[in-house]
Amino acid sequence: MSQSDKSGDTPTRWLDRPDSAKKICWALYVLCAALFFADAFYEKHSHYAVEDWFGFYAIFGFVFSIGLVLSAKELRRLVMRKEDYYD
């Protein structure tokens, strides 16, 4: 049974509640940490020595995804057009 909002018309979904967003974030944190530490439990067949470092792919992916976001923000300044460009 779901709760109703203040107007009483539509029921509140579980994703609309603020505590649900916190639970999802914590679940993602736990999943990321578990996958990071799972790196210790399988045998690596690497081509380069750096790939044998513990957590290399997790750290590599994290650093370069942040780098991608920051470079996209800077690239936006270069290619951005005025709001009325097509008018």
Image (cartoon, rainbow, N blue to C red):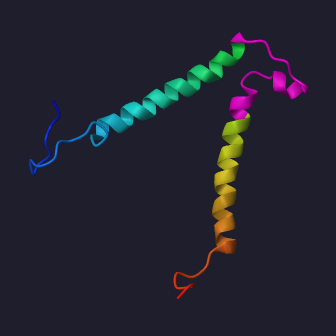
Q: What count of labels does the image hold?
A: 0
Q: Is residue 17 left or right of residue 82?
A: left
Q: Quick one: 85 or 30, which is closer to the camera?
A: 85
Task: Please tell me in which quadrant of the rendered image residue 51 appears.
Answer: top right
- Is 58 included in the stretch rendered in magenta? yes
Is residue 72 depicted above or below 57 in this figure? below
Q: In this view, does 54 lie to the left or right of 72?
A: right
Q: Where is residue 70 in the image (x, y as percent from the top left)?
A: 65, 56
- Is 54 included in the stretch rendered in magenta? yes
Q: Position of residue 83 (x, y in %)?
A: 52, 81
Extreme bottom residue here?
A: 87
Q: Where is residue 75 in the image (x, y as percent from the top left)?
A: 69, 66
Q: Give the range drawn in magenta.
A: 41-59
**Residue for point 9% across, 47% down:** 8
Is residue 70 depicted above or below 44 in this figure? below
Task: Please tell me in which quadrant of the rendered image residue 46 appears.
Answer: top right
- Where does the N terminus fall, quadrant-wise? top left
**Residue for point 9% across, 52% down:** 7
Q: Is residue 68 left or right of residue 21?
A: right
